[in-house]
Amino acid sequence: MEPDRPPHVSAGPAQGPPVRTLGAALAEGTVLLDGGLSNQLEAQGCDLSDALWSARLLADAPHQIEAAHTAYVRAGAQVLITASYQATFEGFERHGIGRVRAAELLADSVELARRAGAGAGRQIWVAASVGPYGAMLADGSEYRGRYGLSVRELERFHRPRVAALAAARPDVLALETVPDMDEAEALLRVAGEFGLPVWLSYSVAGERTRAGQPLAEAFGVAAGNGQVVAVGVNCCDPADADRVVGTAAAVTGKPVVVYPNSGERWDAERRAWAGDSTFDAGRVRAWQEAGARLVGGCCRIGPARIGELAELLTA
């Protein structure tokens, strides 16, 4: 028997379809992403200490997730990334949540972002986050890759979650924090079965994926794929982002997505961040010149920093 749970999110009338697709908006100029969801949830007093991380709040405190999204809308974000990065059927099952309820929670992640954007007075796109296999393990594996699984095994893992998210009709799938080009290939194959636009962003170290592959090769898996509206990097050091935006643009000919973390380092054993922040909103100018069109922040980048980016982009 599943544990007691709050009722399934019901938002009333759904927000109408966007006036423009995200791909069309990127063809016209730069679009602003939100920042780190988990750090905003912690700022709101939420405890994210268990393995489900922010995904637990989909079941326990969905209003907190909507509030976090709303904070980024108020800061100027045009794209909201859902709280589904670490939400998987396997992870929920370990917490006593069955598949039917897990599918509802994945759908709720999209609806909560829709609700937060509904009153913005401007167009807000919702990106359904599809995190890597390593995020489900909750042991830092997404910063290493090379899980010992084949591309087909990774496809089988990702397919049910992508199907559940796609059924909720987000504007785009965010295939994000991908450490390994094998997993990128698996994710793109699965996403191709559902027809939604996607962006693909790797987590990198220097000019290689976290698994050690040259980024020119890794970005190449998205070249020529019409479903991919942007390709780039996230959850990396800002200095690494500086170096690789041009590579992504040159290899794929696509708009580049870039949303680094603060520059602090994640200690998976201590489950804590260490070091100093090196994020500077002024970097966005160089990113734009190198081909970036979808920009924002990842871990430890909050609404204040997204507000700084919004001011620069509208100056």
Image: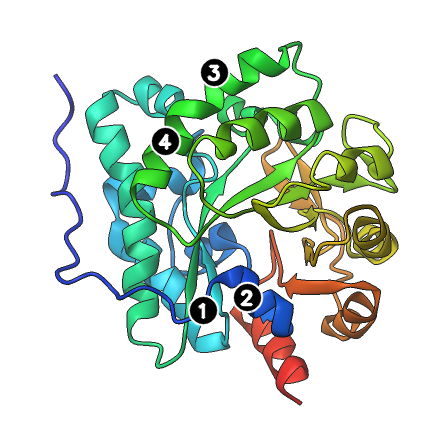
Per the image, the residue denoted by label 3 is 156
> Which of marks 3 and 4 precedes in the sequence?
3
Residue picked out by circle 1: 20
- x and y percentages locating residue 161 in the rendered image: 39, 29
Locate residue 114: give its quadrant.
bottom left
Helix, strand or loop at label 4? It is helix
Residue 304 horizontal/vertical position (percent): 56, 73
Looking at the rendered structure, the number of numbered marks drawn on it comes to: 4
Q: Residues under labels 4 and 3: Cα distance?
A: 11 Å
Give the residue drawn at x 77%, y 47%.
252
Can residue 115 be seen at all in this image of the molecule?
yes
Label 1 sits on a secondary structure element that is loop
Query: Residue visible at 61% across and 54% down?
Result: 298
Q: CA distance from mark 3 to mark 1?
A: 32 Å
Q: Residue at x 71, y 18 (%)?
A: 146
Crowd around label 4: few <14 · some 14–19 · many ≥20 (10 Å): some
Q: Earlier in the sequence, mark 3 or mark 1?
A: 1
Residue that label 2 marks = 24
**Marks 3 and 2, how far apart at CA:** 31 Å
Q: Earlier in the sequence, mark 1 or mark 4?
A: 1
Answer with mark 3 or mark 2, whichever residue precedes in sequence.
2
Q: CA distance from mark 1 to mark 4?
A: 24 Å
The nearer-to-camera label among 3 and 2 is 2
Determine crowd level at label 3: few under 14, some 14-19, many 20+ residues with C-alpha closer than 10 A: some
Q: Position of residue 83 (x, y in %)?
A: 41, 46
State yes or no: discs 2 and 1 in contact (Cβ < 8 Å): yes
Q: Amino acid at mark 3?
A: Arg
Nearer to us: label 1 or label 4:
1
135 to 43, vertically: above or below? above
**Given this view, does label 3 or label 1 mark the residue nearer the observer?**
1
**Residue density around tag 1, few if under 14, some if 14–19, many if 20 or more, within 10 Å:** few
